[in-house]
Each structure stands twice: as C-alpha cells, then as structure tokens.
Amino acid sequence: MSDTLDLDALIEEAIQTAIEASKQNRLKRDNPYVPFLIKVLLPHKQGLHRSYVFKQIEAERKAKGLSIPPKFEQAVQRRFEDYCSQCRGFNRPSSDDLFYFPTRKGSGVWAVHIDRATSWLTANSKP
C-alpha cells in the first residue's frame, strides 16, 4: 500500500513540477502531458482507450486550473507517440519507452510500462 502512496506522490510531484515549468514559459521543454498520461494509464493494467485518456487528462487539467489548448488531443497523442517505441520516429533512450499498445498498434488502446514510468517520474520530478 505504501508503494502506491509513494507512486501517487511521485506522480503528483511530477505534475506540479511540469505545471510550474509551464507557468515559466518552459512548456515545450517540460511538457506536462507525460505525467498526466502516466497518472491516467497507471491504474489500467490492460490499457485504456485513448478517448477515455483524453477525457481524464482534460478533467485533471481543468481541476488544476490549466487551460485546454485548441489542439489538445493532438498534443496528448504526440506525447504518447514520443514516448512509445512502437511508434514511428521514436528516438529516445530505452528508459523513455514509457507507453505501449497492449493489444495492437492502431487499436486505440494505450498502456504504460509501470516500472519505466516510475523510474522516469523519479528522475524527472525534480527541477
């Protein structure tokens, strides 16, 4: 149970760090969508359909007083693809391969590699 609480605290810290970064005009470098994607996907071991991911991230952002940009879904999709080795153009270290398609690519179902996401949050939650 304490592992879950620690992970929740890491996720919340990463989101708060990303929010502060965006307030300081560093949104492009420290994009808050990755921690939101992790938070939304983490409880869904079998994955979650992307339409629900969009709805949940939008609700999380609104709850934190963040705006929803006009191309919100495209931005979230792009972040997912940037951190998914199954997507064309993935050119990050393997430690940044955070997301995957649990059934097949193009199914619309997204999932998160829990261990990698936890490590990524730990490494990226500090300013």
Image: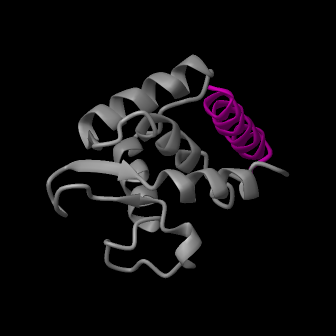
Q: How many marks?
A: 0
Q: In the depicted view, which residue is nearer to us: 114 or 35? A: 114
In the displayed structure, 38 sits above or below 107; it is: above
Position of the N terminus, as image quadrant, is top right
- Residue at the image point whose x is 46% and y is 57% from the top: 79
Query: What range of the chain is rendered magenta?
Result: 1-25
In this rendering, would 116 be left or right of 104? right
Spot the residue most to the top.
Answer: 63
Residue 119 is situated, as x and y percent measured from the top left of the image, at 65, 57
Q: In the depicted view, which residue is nearer to us: 66 or 83? A: 83
Specify the principal SS of the magenta part: helix
Residue 49 is situated, as x and y percent measured from the top left of the image, at 23, 40
Q: In the depicted view, which residue is nearer to us: 38 or 72? A: 38
In the displayed structure, 78 sits above or below 92; it is: above
Residue 10 is inside the magenta segment: yes
Q: In the depicted view, which residue is nearer to us: 25 or 55? A: 55
In this rendering, would 82 be left or right of 61? left
Q: Which of the colour schemes (rainbow, by chain, secondary structure, one colour) is used?
A: one colour
- Residue at the image point whose x is 74% and y is 36% from the top: 13
- Residue at the image point whose x is 64% and y is 58% from the top: 120
In this rendering, would 89 be left or right of 10? left
Spot the residue most to the right.
Answer: 127
Residue 12 is inside the magenta segment: yes
Spot the residue most to the front.
Answer: 1
Residue 5 is situated, as x and y percent measured from the top left of the image, at 67, 27
- Residue at the image point whose x is 28% and y is 43% from the top: 46
Residue 65 is situated, as x and y percent measured from the top left of the image, at 62, 21
- Identify the image quadrant of residue 70: top left
